[in-house]
Image: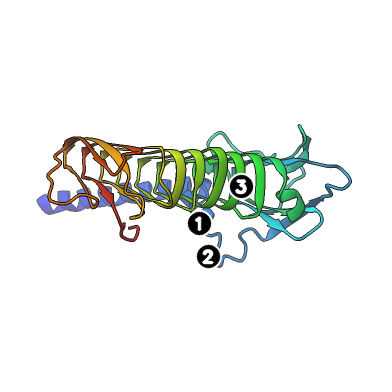
Amino acid sequence: MKIRKKWVFTGVTCALAALFLWAVWSVGEKAGDFGFKALRQGTGDADFHRYTYEYTWDPEEISVRGLKIDWVHGGVEVKSTGGAVIRITEQANRPLTEEEKLEYKRSGGALAIQWNGLPSVLGRFDDLEKSLVVEVPAGLAGEMELLSCKNRSGNIQIGGGFTAGKIEVSSASGSLAASGLTGETGSFSTLSGGLSLQGINCQETLWASTAAGKLEASGLSAEELTLITVSGGVSADSIRAEELRVKSISGPVWVRLGGSPKEAALESVSGDLRLGMPGSIGDFTAEYNGISGGFSTDFLTDRRLGRSGSVSVGNGSAKLRFTTTSGVMRVEKQAAAAP
C-alpha cells in the first residue's frame, strides 16, 4: 500500500511538473523566448534584423540644426560620416507594416526620428524589435544646436565628431557609450546598464549617471562635472573640472585628475574613495569624514590623519571633500591603473 501511494505521489508530481513546464514554454513563446530574441542580435542568427529599410534626408534641401531621436525597443547608433545626406537605416526582426515603420520629420529646427511602432503596454511581450543607425554628414555634425537621443530599451552608441550646444542621451534599460563629443552642456544617463564616456568636452556642465551599472570615463572636461552611480563603481581618468562631484551609493570611486580643480567632492555610502592628483600639483586642503576607514595621502608622510578632520598640503588652493560610511579615503600622488 505504501509503495502504491509512493507511485501515485510520483505520478502526480510528474504531471504537475509537466504542466508547469508547458505553462513556462507557453509564456516564453509569447514573451519572445523570455527576451532572448534580443540577445540573438550579433550572435549569427541570420533571421534577426534581416529586414532593412533605408531613408535619407538632404539638409541642403530642407535644413536642420539638430537631431532628436525617440526610440522604444532596440539598439541605436549615431555617427558622423563623409556623406552629403543624413542616412537613416532601420532594421527589424520581421517585415514591418507602414504603421510600424519609423517616422522622421523636421521639428523645431531639428530632424526628429521616432519609433512609430505598435509596442504593447509591457514591451517585452511584443515580438517587434528594431535597431536604428543614423549617419550624419560631418559638416552638419560639427555645428549642431541639439543632439538628443532617448531609448526606452536598448543600447545606445554615439560616435565622435559631433559638436552641439546641448547634448542629451538617455536609456531606461541598456548600456550607453559615447566618445569624441563637444558641447556647451551634456547629459548622459541610463537606469539599468553600464555607462562609458571618452573624450567629452563641455564648456559649462557635464552630467553622467547610472542607477545600476558601472560608470567608466576618460578625458572628460567641463566647468561643472558630475558623475553618479547608485549601484556600481566609478572609474575615471584624465578628468578636468573647476567643480567636480563624484558619488556612489554602493561601489568604489576611483578618479584621476588631469589638472587641479577649485573644488572636488567624493561621496560613497559603501566603497573606497581614491583621488589621483599629478605630483606636480600637490596644493590642496582636504576635509574628510568617515565612520569605518580612514584618510591618507602620498603628499604627507609619517602622519596619522584618522577618520575625520582636515589637512592642508602646499598652499591648500584646491578644496577637496571626502565623505563615506564604509571605506578608505585617499589622495594619491601617482595613482595606479584604474581597476
Is residue 333 found left or right of 260 in the rendered image? left
Residue 91 visible in this rendered orientation of the protein: yes
Residue that lies at the very extreme toward the front in this rendered image = 315
Q: Amino acid at mark 1?
A: Leu
Question: Can you identify the residue that label 1 sits on?
Answer: 39
Question: Can you identify the residue that label 3 sits on?
Answer: 182
Residue 332: percent from left, percent from top: 28, 52
Crowding near pointer 3: few (<14 within 10 Å), some, many (20+)?
many
Residue 106: percent from left, percent from top: 79, 37
Query: What is the CA distance from the residue labelled 1 to the residue labelled 2?
Result: 8 Å
Query: What is the CA distance from the residue labelled 1 to the residue labelled 3?
Result: 32 Å
Q: How many marks?
A: 3
Query: What is the CA distance from the residue labelled 2 to the residue labelled 3?
Result: 34 Å
Q: Amino acid at mark 2?
A: Thr
Observer-side mark, 2 or 3, equals: 3
| Residue shown at the point (34%, 47%) measured from the top left | 233
Q: Amino acid at mark 3?
A: Thr
Residue 209: percent from left, percent from top: 45, 40
Question: Can you identify the residue that label 2 sits on?
Answer: 43
Q: Are marks 1 and 2 in contact (CB under 8 Å)?
A: yes
Q: What's the image's color scheme?
A: rainbow
Is residue 281 found left or right of 46 in the rendered image? left
